[in-house]
Amino acid sequence: MRPKEDIKKRIGSVPVNTSAKRDKQVLDDVLNALEQSRKELPVSSRPNIWRIIMKNNVTRLAAAVFVIAAVVGVAQFDSARAAFAGTARVVATGLAGLKEFIRDMRTREPQPPSAVVPAKPDEQQTAVQGNRIFASVQVFSVQSGQDGLRKFFETEGIELTPAGSSPNTSYARLGPEKTERFIELVGKAEGIERLSSPSLMILEGQEGVMGIAGAGEPDATALALVATIPNDGDSIDLSISFLRGQSGFEIPRLRINTDEAVLFRLVTTGPAQDKQNDQDASAGQGCTLVLVKAKVFSQT
Amino acid sequence: MIEDKLLIWKLKLGDGAALARIYEKYKNDLLRIAAGLSSRTSVAEDIVHDVFVSLAQSPQKLKLSGNLKAYLATCVANRVRNSNRAGQREQATSLDENEPVTADSQPDRWIIRSEELDRLNNAMAQLPYPQREAVILHVQGGMKFRTIAKSQNVSINTVQSRYRYGLDKLRSVLDGEVKK
């Protein structure tokens, strides 16, 4: 008996040869039929490429991924376009308010940083409907061995508080003066590059998400922001989440004054190394710095 | 498979070159399937001819969820089944199959017959049609049992049984020929 595989192989490989003359005749018939169908086909019933894409789940998903990738790519790697997109969003909600916000930021007197208020589950939030929070984010890439940043932290007395290990993140709150000096530093320091400056206008209590680039990492890091306004009116509670790949963490309800900024440092190394010396890590290793500012933009 | 998707897209736009490429790519496979299913070369040729012409006449109606070869093989199988139902095929072999045929003696033939093809088709002709269809569509058409079951409106177990019995019988027929 022949094994089954032999039979299958024999059936599948039996040669079929065709007459070239008849081949041409059949192909002519087929092409004539196609030409005839083209003449009879109304223009309106010809296929629409977009419709073909949207009919199929796979191509539809691919199109969606392409569009999202294009948007994220523009937001992450083209700071000018990101700024434009953010500005356009703001214009949509009111240009006058934005001018007021900028003027306020420039003229406000420096205030001492207040302590971080931990989350209190029983704390009542005002949850005033209609408050809008304008959040601006600046993302910087810091090359390893950048000494100016370490000196800046030492000079300004900035201590970073560990926030999460995946991505390995710590943060510090910066008053207006420190924020200004930090901006000056990163503007002139070699080895520090501004990657993007996305911004968001979000309703109080609602989440806004933006993509930020990682320091030399293939995975993009996303930052989600929820802002609420406590009763005192001079501060903002920020709940900030970082997500990289399948991991992430949340800093719940970080209270800052309205003129303060929060500086996050995302290190690309593992948590064990980072725990040894947090300050040294910022100088010796490449990292990403994320500066977040938030402002109550309008109240309706 | 990506090439097939592209070819179909171009075909729907009326591209003759795409249709010619589909024809060149799959004509031999379809002729082999049709010849195995119908056991009559003339019927097999007509069926494959009609399948391609039908494809050319209404490319807009082509709704392809699987691969193109399986789709065309199903078209061939359906047409052979319809041909059988209509009584166009009355016996497994006919006179033109029994005569010694060469390309010269039948210049209008599309398939140039070979000893190997004839032997296989004669063996196939001894299988019950459902078994033959299961074997040919799976082995020559490259179709999955699930797809065959769906096209025949039977359960997947039925198709697998038909395939198994068909292959066993085919093996014994071909072995019998060798012993002679």
Image (spheres, helix red, strand yellow):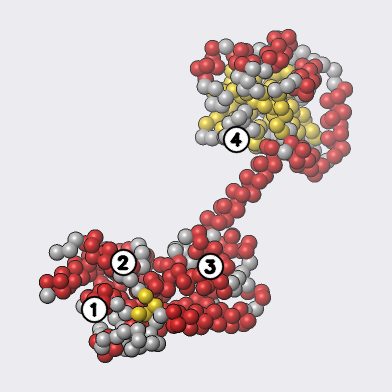
Vertical placement of residue A194 versus A76, above or below: above
- Look at label 4 and name its amino acid: Ala
Q: Are marks 3 and 2 on the same chain?
A: no
The residue under the point 83% across, 35% down is: A98
| Contact between labelled residues 1 and 3, with CB atoms less than 8 Å apart | no
Q: Which mark is residue A235?
A: none
The amino acid on which the numbered mark 2 sits, given as a three-letter code, is Gly
**Chain for mark 3?**
B
Q: Which residue is mark 3?
A: B8
Q: Are marks 3 and 2 in contact (CB under 8 Å)?
A: no
Q: Badge 4 sits on which subunit?
A: A
Task: Name the residue rendered at 61%, 12% in the picture.
Answer: A280
Q: Are marks 1 and 4 in contact (CB under 8 Å)?
A: no
Q: Chain of mark 1?
A: B
For the residues labelled 3 and 2, the Cα–Cα distance comes to 25 Å
Label 3 amino acid?
A: Ile
Q: Chain of mark 2?
A: A
Tags 2 and 1 on a common chain: no
Residue A270 point in image, percent of width and height? 52, 22
Q: Which residue is mark 2?
A: A12
For residue A136, above or below residue B5: above
Vertical placement of B125 versus A276: above or below? Answer: below
Tag 4 residue: A220
> Which quadrant of the view contains residue A261?
top right
Q: Nearer the viewer, mark 4 or mark 2?
A: 2
The amino acid marked with disc number 1 is Asn
Classify residue A170 as left or right of residue A4: right
Q: Secondary structure at mark 2?
A: helix
